[in-house]
Amino acid sequence: MSKNQKCHYCGGQEFAVRRMRYVYSRKEKHLFVPDMPVDVCLSCGMIFYHGPSLLRVEEQFKAIYERHELATRYTQMPVLELVD
Ligand SMILES: [Zn+2]
């Protein structure tokens, strides 16, 4: 997001770039991104993802699951199911 754009929610014009954890999921398959760059609105806290980053995650997801390329690294996560 460029500096002269407004927050779609509150109209704020100041943003900070942060890194966040992000999980891209499709059909029970997941790609974990530990350092996704986002713009955070300094007025309301709303998070805006960067279009090119989202496209890159989607492309990498396809590379891994359709073309069987290797991810940067692999991890295992414990799962907690809260619904009875
Ligand atoms: Zn805002």
Image (cartoon, rainbow, N blue to C red):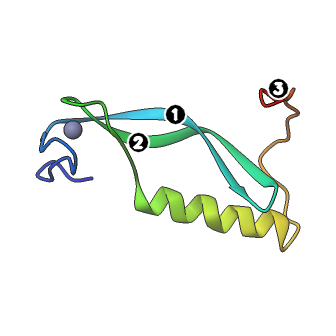
Residue 20's tag is 1
- For mark 3, what is the residue? 80
Residue 61: name its quadrant. Answer: bottom right
- Amino acid at dot 3: Leu
Between the C-alphas of marks 3 and 1, the distance is 21 Å
> Where's residue 64, x and y in %?
81, 63
> Where's residue 70, x and y in %?
85, 57
Mark 1 surroundings within 10 Å by alpha-carbon count, few (fewer than 14), some (14 through 19), many (20 or more): some
- For mark 2, what is the residue? 38
- Name the residue furthest front: 84
Mark 3 or 1 closer to N-term? Answer: 1
Given contact means CB atoms under 8 Å apart, are the residues at marks 1 and 2 in contact?
yes
Mark 3 surroundings within 10 Å by alpha-carbon count, few (fewer than 14), some (14 through 19), many (20 or more): few
Kindly state the secondary structure of the residue where label 1 is placed.
strand
- Amino acid at dot 2: Val
Q: Is residue 31 left or right of residue 4?
A: right
Mark 3 or 2 closer to N-term? Answer: 2
